Amino acid sequence: MNADTTTRAPLIPARITMTDVTADVLRPIERPGKLWYLGLFVSLAALAFGVWAVAVQQMKGVGVWGLRNPVMWAFDITNFVFWIGIGHAGTLISAILYLLRQRWRTSINRSAEAMTIFAVMTAGLFPLIHLGRTWYAYWLFPYPNERLLWVNFRSPLLWDVFAVSTYFTISLVFWYQGLVPDLATVRDRAKSKIKKLLYGIFSLGWTGSARDWNHYEKAYLLLAALSTPLVLSVHSIVSFDFAVSILPGWHTTIFPPYFVAGAIFSGFAMVMTLLVVLRRVFRLEEYIGMHHLEMMNKIILVTSWMVGYAYMVEAFTAWYSENPFERFTFWNRAFGSMWWCYWIMVVCNFIIPQIFWFGWARRHIATMFIVSIFVNIGMWFERFTIIVTSLYRDFLPASWENYAPTIYEIGMTVGSFGFFMTFFFLFARFLPSLSLAEVKGVLVNPSGKESHKHSEVLHG
């Protein structure tokens, strides 16, 4: 490790001091710029559109979505799977890269963790909305009741409840623990009594002593180890919603690794989108440097090949099975009436990311931002393709029906992005968007080497 840190360029420019880190990272909390207000306004406008669409659906029923036999799932489940996938990169960056001692994660882990929390919150809305009668959502939980109702433990939809709630709880605790030392710094710099009181409560009496740091690092390591298997388990269970059925296009054993790879792929693309905006809005270019972004682009390229390989294996398996229904489903996906969904998926998820083979593309801000947007679009269409193109041409040709979304489904989808971005902008306004303690840990100290433990960092 020492040899490595002495031969490569530092992650943060050597002239930046600990005092600079505190001042620059906490600047948005003390003085948000005009771009922050503009971003929040756009997010709230999108959220208002979604609230209107969901309010109409709640009053009139799910019939306003235009769903009919055989397409009874569409935008609602597509959005659920998409947002759950987005939430994977946060825990991956925070937990797995931490266990692997990848120090370039220090400038991006806080935003990625926040993205995970807000993405899972967004995903959690869709099963509730899809119920139609949202006020009965508590029936999903097993509890003694006088109606003798009991949940079906053999249903993967119930497995989702436990998997997603567990993942959200652990991710939230992991994120909050990482915030505690930074909240103490905000507390110490706060000028108003209300801010000092609130940040003081949430910093849990942190003093920055060696004992505090010792307990902190042990707990952080344990939570990282606990979170790691959840990255693999959550989206595997979400894939079971489809894989345990007998519908052609869904009943396949490749779905668990396929969904996990796609989730990591889409999550990193969303982190990239957010980081490019964040570093521009809050002038954090020196902390979220080109090395951080290039490493993420390399992971996007690798996971793009994993997703592309899954597409090929899925099609090969359908052909090799000699099952006429499976063969027809995959042929219809590529060349049927909804062929455009399939090819948007392939082009956005596999063809476009190949530009990252070129070094200039991995270090060009506009290129990486555009590619991340295309990947987000492609991954949404991947979920949509899996769900709708398997349903609209089922076993019975007599029931075949084309599908088109209504304004309420589009509003619900736009609103989900507004919901997610509103929380993210509020997070960037009221909490440190970079981990102060971890960024200070990779500064070049007077000896010319980077620090390697939180306890070596002064509580500045």
Image: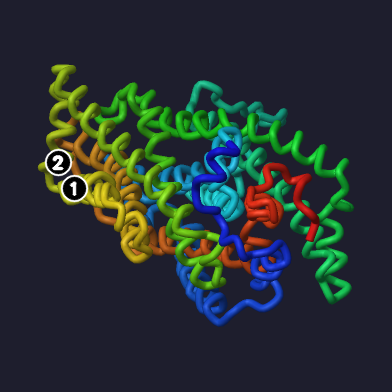
Q: Are marks 2 and 1 in contact (CB under 8 Å)?
A: yes
Farthest residue to the bottom: give it. Answer: 34
Provide the residue designation for mark 1. Answer: 343
**Residue nearer the viewer, 99 or 194:** 99
Q: How many marks?
A: 2
- 105 in relation to 59, above or below: above
Please tell me whether residue 180 is drawn above or below residue 315 in the rendered image.
below
- Residue drawn at x 38%, y 23% is 244
- Residue sitting at the far front: 447
Residue beneath the point at 28% across and 31% down = 310
Label 2 sits on a secondary structure element that is helix
> Of the residues shown, which amino acid type is indicated by label 1?
Trp
Specify the label residue 166 is tagged with: none
Query: Is residue 127 visible to the viewer in this orientation of the structure?
Result: no
The spot of residue 290 in percent (x, y) is 44, 58
Query: Vertically, is 198 above or below 169?
Result: below
Asked which quadrant contains residue 311, the reply is top left
Q: Which residue lies under the disc numbered 2?
A: 334
Please identify the quadrant where the C terminus is shown.
Answer: bottom right
Q: Nearer the viewer, residue 213 or 265?
A: 213
* Residue at horizontal 33 percent and vertical 25 percent from the top: 254
Height in image: 411 above or below 372? below
Q: Quadrant of the N terminus?
A: top right
